[in-house]
Image (spheres, rainbow, N blue to C red):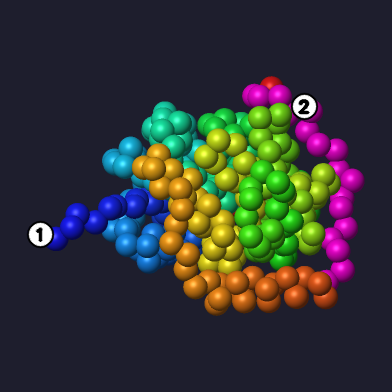
């Protein structure tokens, strides 16, 4: 009698609109790393208007998108996805949100023209775009919230948004190279509950397998899984190393002395 394979489900929010700078690679990385551990890895695409099977999802992925795409998805996020996403995170699901997706999980994203897209406030951050776009390689020294090895994340950023964290959100770490959240306080990303927000495209997870496993492990904890079978990540980590070496040859990014928006206390 065939042994019933455990399932592992990835939910891809707005797969058709919020997917730039290689974001799709994060989906492949999550599915493959679960498959290599013997899980029946499945993908659910969660475009506008559907919330089908959101309660089955272990890890949600929300990719990046230009202002135009964010304008097309934020209402659906508020009207259809918010309650189920909140419930799923409370029930132990993980979320990885990159750039435009990261911004819309916060309180709001305001474009450089001043148009404001309300977010769902799942994470205590707010974002206001500035004139200068932050573009280039990023190296992050991971803070003590995440006990990961290597203690760095590498990726690529391209955004006009400046994100500021409120008291409930913690940064992933500090930038060694790049602008990160806002180009002024040196932080990158956000950790709150099961949500990981970041500006790192590239795609992120193939070059940072330790973060991929953190998301998978966190989601499987509710099934009593504490450890994942180790994988041979030599290829992934040599790509990681390559970016670190390249970064060392770069002059450090110059922080901009821009004023943060008025207090980031929730929703004001
Ligand atoms: N439109 C947003 C910004 O410019 C997000 C861009 C992105 O996802 N790369 O900041």
- At a point 80% along the width and 49% down the height, the residue shown is 186
Height in image: 246 above or below 68? below
Left or right, 34 with respect to 110, comes to: left
Q: Which mark is residue 65?
A: none
**CA gap, disc 1 to disc 2?**
60 Å
- At a point 54% along the width and 63% down the height, the residue shown is 209
- At a point 79% along the width and 59% down the height, the residue shown is 176
Is the residue marked by circle 2 packed among few (<14), some (14-19), or many (20+) residues within 10 Å? few
Q: Secondary structure at mark 2?
A: loop
Which image quarter is the C terminus in? top right
- At a point 86% along the width and 43% down the height, the residue shown is 258
Residue at mark 1: 1
Image position, residue 53 (x, y; %): 29, 41
Looking at the rendering, which quadrant does residue 5 occupy? bottom left
Residue at mark 2: 263
Q: Is residue 2 magenta?
A: no
Between 206 and 251, the residue placed more toward the observer is 206
**Boundaries of the magenta span:** 250-267
Image position, residue 109 (x, y; %): 63, 38
């Amino acid at each position: 009698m065939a042994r019933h394979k455990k399932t592992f489900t990835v939910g891809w929010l707005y797969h058709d609109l919020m997917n730039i700078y290689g974001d799709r690679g994060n989906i492949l990385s999550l599915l493959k790393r679960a498959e290599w551990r013997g899980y029946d890895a499945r993908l659910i695409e969660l475009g506008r208007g559907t919330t089908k099977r959101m309660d089955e999802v272990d890890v949600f992925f929300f990719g990046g998108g230009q202002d135009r795409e964010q304008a097309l998805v934020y209402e659906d996020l508020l009207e259809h996805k918010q309650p189920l996403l909140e419930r799923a995170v409370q029930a132990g699901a993980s979320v990885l949100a990159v750039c435009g997706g990261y911004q819309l999980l916060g309180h709001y994203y305001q474009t450089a023209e001043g148009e404001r897209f309300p977010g769902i406030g799942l994470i205590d951050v707010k974002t206001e775009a500035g004139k200068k776009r932050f573009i280039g390689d990023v190296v992050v020294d991971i803070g003590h919230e995440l006990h990961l090895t290597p203690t760095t994340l590498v990726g690529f950023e391209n955004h006009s948004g400046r994100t500021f964290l409120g008291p409930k959100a913690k940064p992933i770490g500090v930038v060694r190279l790049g602008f990160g959240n806002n180009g002024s306080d040196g932080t990158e990303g956000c950790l709150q509950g099961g949500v990981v927000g970041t500006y790192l495209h590239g795609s992120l997870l193939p070059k940072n397998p330790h973060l991929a496993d953190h998301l998978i492990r966190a989601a499987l904890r509710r099934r009593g899984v504490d450890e994942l079978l180790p994988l041979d990540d030599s290829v992934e980590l040599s790509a990681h190393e390559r970016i670190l070496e390249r970064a060392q040859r770069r002059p450090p990014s110059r922080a901009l002395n821009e004023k943060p928006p008025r207090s980031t206390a929730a929703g004001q």
